[in-house]
Amino acid sequence: MKRKVIAGLVLGVVALALVLALVVKPGNMRATGTGAGGQVGVIYIEGPIYSGQRTGGLFGYPGSAEGIAARLRQAAKDPQLKAVVIRLNSPGGTAAAAQEISSEVQKLKQTGKKVVASMGDTAASGAYWIAAGTDLIVANSGTMTGSIGVIMELVNTEGLYDKLGLDTETFKSGPYKDMGSPSRPVTPGERAIFQSMIDDIYNQFVEIVARGRNMEVEEVKKIADGRVLTGRQAKETGLVDRLGGLHDAVLLAGELAGIPGEPQVVELGPKSIWQELFVTAGGSVFQGLSRSFVPILPGQREGYYFYFQ
C-alpha cells in the first residue's frame, strides 16, 4: 500500500511538472513593475557554476555557464534593457565556467549597458569572480562572499585496493599521462605541476579582482587566502560597494543607467520548473536540490576540475 502511495505521489509531481513545462516555456521574459522610463533585466545564477548543457530536464540547472552566457547575450541585444542585475546565490564552481560568464559580462558592458551584481545568501569564489567584473556590487550584510582562491582535490584509494586484493597496471605514452590516478600516490614531479596550475589560475583570479575593484594586486592578495567574509566585512575591505537586497540593486542599476523613477524589471530566464515551484513559493529548497543532484567534483583522472568553493 505504501509503495502505491509513493508511486502515486511521484506520478503526480511528474504530471504537475509537465503542465508547468507547457506554461513556463524556455526563453520567456517576465516583466514586473510599471516603470515607463526604462527596463532593468535580472539574470539569476543559483547553485554551483559549471560548463555544460544542464538547463534542461525537470530539475533544471540555472548555474550552467552556457545558459547564463546566452541570457547575457540576449540582454546585450535587447534595446529596451538599459541595465542588467545579476542575482548571485552560488558557492562557486569551476574556473572555466566562471571565466566564460565573466567574459560575457564584459561584452555586455561594452554595449553601454550597466551591470550590477546582487548577492543573495552566498556569492563566493567563482560567483565573486563574476561579480568582480560588474559596475557595482550590492550585498546583504549577512551574505557569505569572498573565498578568493582555487582548490583541486585528488583521492588516493591505493590502501583500499590493497585490502580488496585489487591491483592495476597502467600503459601510458608519457610519464604524466596518468597524473592523479587514484591507484597510486602523487609523485613530487606531478605535485609540482598541479601546484603550478593552481597558482596560475589563482593569479588570474587575483588579477580579475584587482582590475574590477580598482585595487592593487598585493592589496587583493592580503585577503585572497580563501577566507569567507560577510557582506559587511566585504564592504569594509573594498570587495563590495553597497549593502542592500535585490530591489536596492535594481534601483541602483536604474540610477546608473539614467532611468528616471523606478525601472520596470524584466526577468531573463526562465527560472527552472523547480524554482517556480519551490523558490517562488518562499524558500531555498531548489538550492538544496541543485547542490544534491549536481555535486562539486574533485579532480579526476583524465579530467581535472579546478573549482572555487
Image: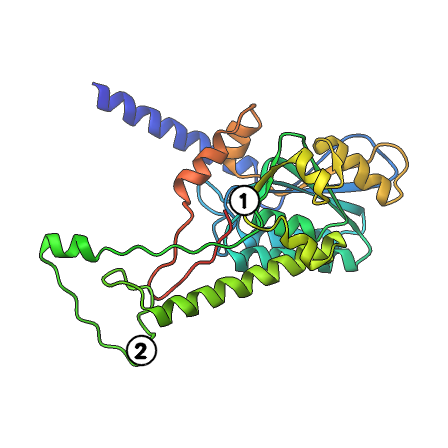
Nearest the eye: 267 or 182:
182
Amino acid type, label 1: Pro
Task: Tell me the residue that label 2 is attached to.
Answer: 175
Residue at point 54% right, 44% down? 62
Amino acid of disc 2? Pro
Q: Position of residue 31 (x, y in %)?
A: 72, 36
> In the figure, 239 relative to 151: above or below?
above
Residue for point 62% across, 43% down: 269
* Residue at the farthest top position: 1
Residue depicted at x 67% and y 54% = 209
Please name whichever residue, 42 or 215, is drawn nearer the observer in this view of the structure.
Answer: 215
Q: Earlier in the sequence, mark 1 or mark 2?
A: 1
Residue 196 position within the rendered picture, expressed as x and y whole percent measured from the top left: 48, 67
Q: Residue at x 44, y 58 (%)?
A: 305
Residue labelled with disc 1: 62
Q: Quadrant of the N terminus?
A: top left
Q: Is residue 43 left or right of residue 199?
A: right
Chosen colour scheme: rainbow
Residue 210's x, y, as percent?
70, 56
Q: Residue furthest bottom?
A: 173
- Number of numbered markers: 2
Nearer to me, 25 or 266:
266
Q: Quadrant of residue 117?
A: top right
Callout 1 crowding tier (Cα within 10 Å): few <14, some 14–19, many ≥20: many
Q: Does any portion of residue 185 appear in the rendered image?
A: yes
User: Helix or strand or loop: what does disc 1 sit on?
Assistant: loop
Cα–Cα span, label 1 and label 2: 39 Å
Mark whose residue sits in front, 1 or 2? 2
> In the shown orientation, is residue 285 left or right of residue 140?
left
18 relative to 166 in the view: left or right: right
Element at badge 2?
Answer: loop
- On screen, residue 295 versus residue 71, left or right, reads left
